[in-house]
């Protein structure tokens, strides 16, 4: 049995197309399957469409959140409630082509791999600035963390149940799934494909949201920013002692103290900025620790047609 987890946020236009195309592919594969849609607090008719699909198709299940908890929470809810022996995560906008699923299943059935993940080999249709920063993000996080995140990696992947169980066991509140997929290990085959544009609707990921998501990923899977703050502190201390030594020598040798206040003010502002920057880095880690200690649920389900659902997790 294959479970397809589909997070949805304001996808009313794309859902009928996704359901139609995916159903054709799954029926062609000749296996049992379920389509588990996660309504992440949509404000359009997404929930109504999911209910209608569930009435006419027994393979359709849905979980509807009480509000928008974010894609990471939606994926986690899907992992907690999927029943398949193989589990895939997909987007509803058709940027994750369903026609790749048969090939992904063939690769898994060889027994050589535990998951088949997809990666885009092109970013056609994406703004150049976003593409540039995306590539730089992958370079940075692979350098400073223990996670293995391939450039162009999508969340779209097909996994064995054992791998999903490992993901569910990592119940941290601050989640970054791309990092989790790489951190837990398992044998992964990377399947390249050309970028596909959305069939309907607009992307929910603005540049600012992607930037914050990247920062979360770096903080969740690396201590390098904290080390950077420490190195800044040591560098500034050394620099300060060196300047102090030069000023004393200049005074003793030439009787000439440092003239002017502008240089002093610049130094104070510079050092103050470095201090605030380092405090900000530590504040990010403290804030995430604070959220973890609260132990709030990742999601709250208000409506569902799934039996024995894990409502709070």
Image (tube, rainbow, N blue to C red):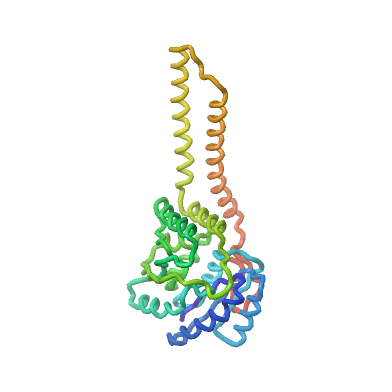
Q: For this rendering, which residue is in front, 287 or 217?
A: 217
Q: For this rendering, which residue is in front, 248 or 220?
A: 248
Q: For this rendering, which residue is in front, 232 or 227?
A: 232
At which x and y percent is residue 185?
39, 63
Tell me what residue is drawn at x 55 percent, y 37 percent. Answer: 273
Work out which quarter of the rendered image holds the C terminus and state it: bottom right
Q: How many marks?
A: 0
At which x and y percent is residue 177?
49, 63
| Image-based side of 287 in relation to 127, left or right | right
Residue 288 seen in render: yes
At which x and y percent is residue 286?
56, 47
Relative to 130, say whether 279 is above or below: above
Residue 89 seen in render: no
Residue 85 picture quarter? bottom left
Relative to 155, say whether 250 is above or below: above
Q: For this rendering, which residue is in front, 23 or 308?
A: 23
At which x and y percent is residue 184?
42, 62
Tell me what residue is drawn at x 62 percent, y 86 percent. Answer: 55
């Amino acid at each position: 049995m294959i479970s397809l987890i589909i997070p949805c946020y304001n996808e009313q236009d794309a859902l009928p197309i996704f359901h139609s195309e995916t159903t054709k592919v799954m029926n062609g594969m000749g296996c049992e399957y379920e389509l588990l849609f996660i309504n992440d607090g949509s404000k359009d008719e997404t929930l109504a469409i999911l209910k209608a699909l569930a009435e006419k198709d027994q393979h359709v299940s849905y979980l509807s959140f009480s509000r928008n908890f974010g894609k990471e929470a939606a994926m986690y809810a899907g992992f907690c409630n999927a029943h398949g022996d193989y589990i895939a995560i997909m987007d509803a906008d058709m940027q994750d082509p369903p026609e790749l699923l048969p090939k992904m299943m063939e690769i898994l059935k060889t027994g050589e791999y535990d998951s088949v993940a997809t990666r885009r080999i092109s970013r056609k249709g994406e703004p150049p600035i976003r593409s540039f920063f995306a590539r730089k993000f992958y370079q940075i996080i692979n350098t400073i963390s223990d996670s293995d995140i391939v450039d162009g990696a999508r969340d779209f992947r097909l996994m064995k149940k054992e791998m999903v169980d490992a993901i569910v066991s990592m119940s941290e509140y601050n989640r970054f799934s791309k990092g989790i997929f790489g951190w837990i290990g398992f044998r992964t085959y990377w399947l390249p494909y050309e970028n596909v544009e959305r069939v309907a609707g607009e992307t929910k990921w603005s540049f600012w949201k992607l930037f914050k998501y990247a920062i979360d990923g770096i903080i969740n899977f690396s201590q390098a920013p904290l080390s950077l703050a420490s190195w800044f502190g040591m560098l500034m201390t050394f620099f300060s002692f060196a300047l102090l030594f030069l000023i004393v020598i200049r005074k003793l040798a030439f009787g000439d103290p440092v003239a002017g206040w502008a240089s002093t003010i610049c130094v104070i502002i510079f050092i103050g900025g470095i201090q605030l920057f380092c405090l900000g880095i530590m504040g990010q880690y403290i804030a995430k620790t604070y959220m973890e200690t609260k132990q709030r649920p990742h999601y709250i389900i208000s409506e569902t047609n799934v039996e024995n659902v894990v409502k709070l997790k």
